[in-house]
Amino acid sequence: MNDTGSADRFGHGDFDGEDGLEGKGDLGSKGGFGNKGDKNDKGDKDEQQKGYGIPGGPANGNGNGNDTGPDSDQPPRIPMPRASVEDGGRPLPSLEDLGDLAPQPAPLVLEHRVLKSLLGAWALAACSPDETAAVEEHLGDCGACADEALRLREAVGLLHQPESLDLDPGLRTRVLDGCLDRRPPRIPVPEWAAPYDAETARLDALLQDIGDAEWHAPVRLRWFEGEGPMTRRTTVAGVIAHLLTVDGLVAVALGLDDPLGDVAAEGPTPRARTEAYWRTSHFPPTRAVRAPWREQTHDLVRTVSFTSDSGPARLAVSYGDFELPLQDAMLDRAFECWVHAEDIAEAVDYPYEPPAPRHMHRMIDLAARVLPDVLATRRRAGLASPPHHRHLVPAGEPGRSLRLEIEGMGGGEWLIPLDSPAAVGSAAYEVAHVALDGAEFCRLAAGHVPPAEAAAGQVGDREAIRDVLFAAASLSRM
């Protein structure tokens, strides 16, 4: 439903200090800044006073300052390098051998108020070594500061959890519920629109956290069509443009502006609208597409919040080949928003979690309710086995059923009628049982998992199980 942070997001670079001062002995060997050849060597001052080594000063008879032969009675004008302990091959004396000669740093003495002000930095390991030693010595004598330091250290531990960097999907809902308990909203968001509100907010937070270059990261859209998988290559910005145009179907049904404007699509289907938007763009979509998408999501949530269950909530949203009631269309848009958010997060290496369990349960329930119609459509196209009865089950009557058990987040059980969309699922006519994890089932319905590879527990009629799994994958589309 994570362009990791990339170089654009964090701006990290490398600083290599190994080559900056390297001079192959020029600065640390003979004549450099080390002990050998030090211009402050012992005897330099006296020699300068006598004029040794100075042009025109006293020398061995010639007065030019260059006579340093073996017969000279004077000391050499250029002092020889001093002997060092390293030249003798003997080990350096240890600090214990030096005794009182070893330097002893003076302990840092700070007032109580200063030490108390350093507790926060100490808990974050941001103190200097001297400050750390002073604070830790103080904590052994002051009980009040020790208690405060323990509390701050525990708080720092909460800030550095080893889990995913992504927030708990239910955190936003819990915060909003806490606020609304104190002050109920004048116009609340309908419960059936809450998943769309939450998923668009989570995706918007992801988009806010990525850099400019990551908007052009390649993304491969995946869905299932007929008997095999389909793919379409685009970018992060292209995915947001796709969501913008398909959400526009709901916007048009609510009387809002169509994001396509005057662009003519080959058909009212999501794929045709998306291709028209991509085709008419003068340049590939960039991060500029985030603003209209974000504004449209807010308009949709605001508009449906003014509706009631007996009014426009019963509107039908046309997808070209089929229609969905407004409530189901909002759930469908929430599901696709989560699926494509995971596509984006995978492309930018960003951690992303599934929706809140109660929202995922609603999405799975929509898929379970639509499965009989999709199964019937595939049967008419010759892609599913025919019903086992000569005549279809009458509307409202029980018929052969498959028990779909979803485990984990958003779990539950649904009885899927196999022979007719108008039939009623019945435990008495159960012929097969399939168990799937909630997130796994959603990825199957999104076309991200091939039906044959879905990790499902299967018992019963193998033909019925295959038909239902393929019908679940056929729920996906571009």
Image: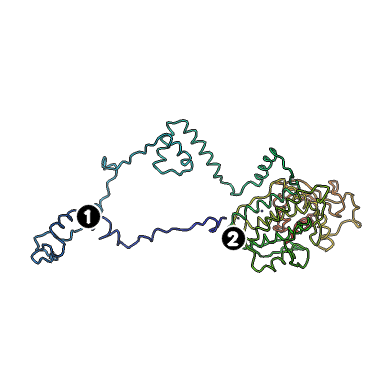
Coordinates of residue 182 in the picture (x, y in percent): 68, 37
Position of residue 138 in the picture relative to residue 430 (left or right): left
Q: Earlier in the sequence, mark 2 or mark 1?
A: 1
Nearer-the-camera pick, 143 or 401: 143
Report the side of 156 relative to 380 (left or right). Answer: left
Q: SS of the residue at dot 2?
A: helix
Mark 1 is surrounded, within 10 Å at the Cα level, by few (under 14), some (14 to 19) or many (20 or more) other residues, namely few
Q: Is residue 102 left or right of residue 357?
A: left
51 over 280 or under it: above or below: above
Secondary structure type for disc 1: loop
Asked if the residue under mark 1 is in contact with the one under mark 2, i.e. CB atoms within 8 Å, the reply is no
Where residue 77 appears, as percent x and y from the top left, is 15, 61
Image coords of residue 287 (percent x, y): 62, 60
Front-most of residues 93 and 123: 123
- Read off the residue under disc 1: 40
Q: Is residue 473 above or below residue 359?
A: below
In the rendered structure, which amino acid carries the disc numbered 2? Answer: Glu
Q: Determine the residue positioned at 86% across, 57% down.
A: 387
Q: Is residue 107 left or right of residue 71?
A: right
Residue 131 in which image quadrant: top left
Is 437 rendered above or below residue 263?
A: above
- Disc 2 marks which residue? 214
| Quadrant (top left, top right, bottom left, bottom right) of the C terminus | bottom right
Which residue occupies the foreground of this view, 413 or 433? Answer: 413
CA gap between label 2 and label 1 equals 59 Å
Q: What amino acid type should be assigned to the residue bearing mark 1?
A: Asn
The structure residue drawn at horizontal position 59% and vertical position 60%, both measured from the top left corner, is 214
Relative height, residue 105 to residue 203 (above, below): above
Q: Position of residue 318 (x, y in %)?
A: 80, 59
How busy is the neighbourhood of tag 2: few (under 14 within 10 Å), some, or many (20 plus)? many
